[in-house]
C-alpha cells in the first residue's frame, strides 16, 4: 500500500505577498496609526507627535537628538515633529544653560495639557489595537513584538534608546 501525500494548496500571488512578514508588519503599522489618529482626531495629533510629548513630559527637557534616540525617530522626522509642535505652542526651545551651542526642548503648559487630554485617546487606540486578542494572546503578542524589536534594534538606521 502506498502512502498518499497531501499537497498544501498553492497560495495566489497576492496571498503570497499578503503573508510575507514585512508586508504584514507594514500593514499592522498602518492599522495602528489609523486607530490612533481616529481616536485622537479631536486633538489633531499623530503617534509621533504624541510620542515626543510623552517623552518630554517624562524625561524632558531634552535636546532634539535625545528625543530622536528615545523615541526611535530619524533626525529629520524628529526635527519636523518638534517644529510642528513648537509652532502649535506645545513645545519651547531654549539655549542650554550648560552649553550655549545646544538647544533644550521642553513642554509648555499647553503641551502638558494636550498630553493629558490625549492620554485617554491613546489608551483607547491601544485597546482597539489589542481587541482581537484574548488576555493570554495579548501578552504573547506583546512579548513577541518586544522580542522582535529587541533582536533587530541594533540593525536599523535608527536605534531605540
Image (tube, grey):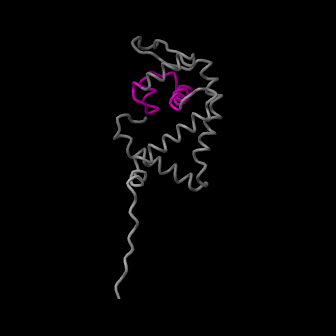
**Residue 11 picture location, percent across and down:** 40, 59
Q: Which residue range is magenta in the image?
A: 47-76
The answer to which image quadrant residue 150 occupies is top left
Front residue of 64/58: it is: 64
Q: Quarter of the image holding residue 5?
A: bottom left
What's the residue at 61%, 55% (across, down)? Answer: 134
Q: Position of residue 120 (x, y in %)?
A: 65, 35
Per the image, is 52 magenta? Answer: yes
* Image quadrant occupied by the N terminus: bottom left
Q: Which residue is drawn at 52% across and 54% down?
A: 140
* Residue 138 x %, y %: 57, 51
- Location of the C terminus by quadrant is top left
The residue nearer to you, when weighing 71 against 85, is: 85
Q: Which residue is drawn at 53% across and 32% down?
A: 47
4, above or below 136, in the image? below
Q: Main secondary structure of the magenta part?
A: helix
- 98 is within the stretch colored magenta: no
Q: Which of 57 and 74 is in front in this view?
A: 74
Residue in the image at 52% along x and 17% along y:
86
Amino acid at each position: 500500500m502506498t502512502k498518499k501525500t497531501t499537497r498544501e494548496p498553492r497560495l495566489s500571488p497576492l496571498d503570497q505577498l499578503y503573508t510575507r512578514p514585512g508586508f504584514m508588519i507594514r500593514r499592522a503599522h498602518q492599522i495602528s496609526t489609523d486607530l490612533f489618529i481616529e481616536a485622537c482626531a479631536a486633538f489633531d495629533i499623530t503617534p509621533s507627535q504624541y510620542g515626543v510629548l510623552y517623552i518630554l513630559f517624562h524625561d524632558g527637557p531634552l535636546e532634539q537628538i535625545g528625543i530622536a534616540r528615545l523615541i526611535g525617530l530619524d533626525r529629520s522626522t524628529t526635527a519636523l515633529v518638534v517644529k510642528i509642535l513648537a509652532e502649535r505652542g506645545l513645545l519651547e526651545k531654549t539655549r542650554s544653560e550648560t552649553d550655549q551651542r545646544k538647544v533644550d526642548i521642553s513642554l509648555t503648559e499647553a503641551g502638558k495639557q494636550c498630553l493629558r487630554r490625549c492620554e485617554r485617546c491613546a489608551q483607547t487606540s491601544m485597546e482597539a489595537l489589542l481587541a482581537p486578542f484574548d488576555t493570554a494572546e495579548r501578552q504573547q503578542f506583546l512579548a513577541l513584538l518586544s522580542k522582535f524589536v529587541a533582536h533587530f534594534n541594533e540593525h536599523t538606521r535608527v536605534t531605540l534608546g
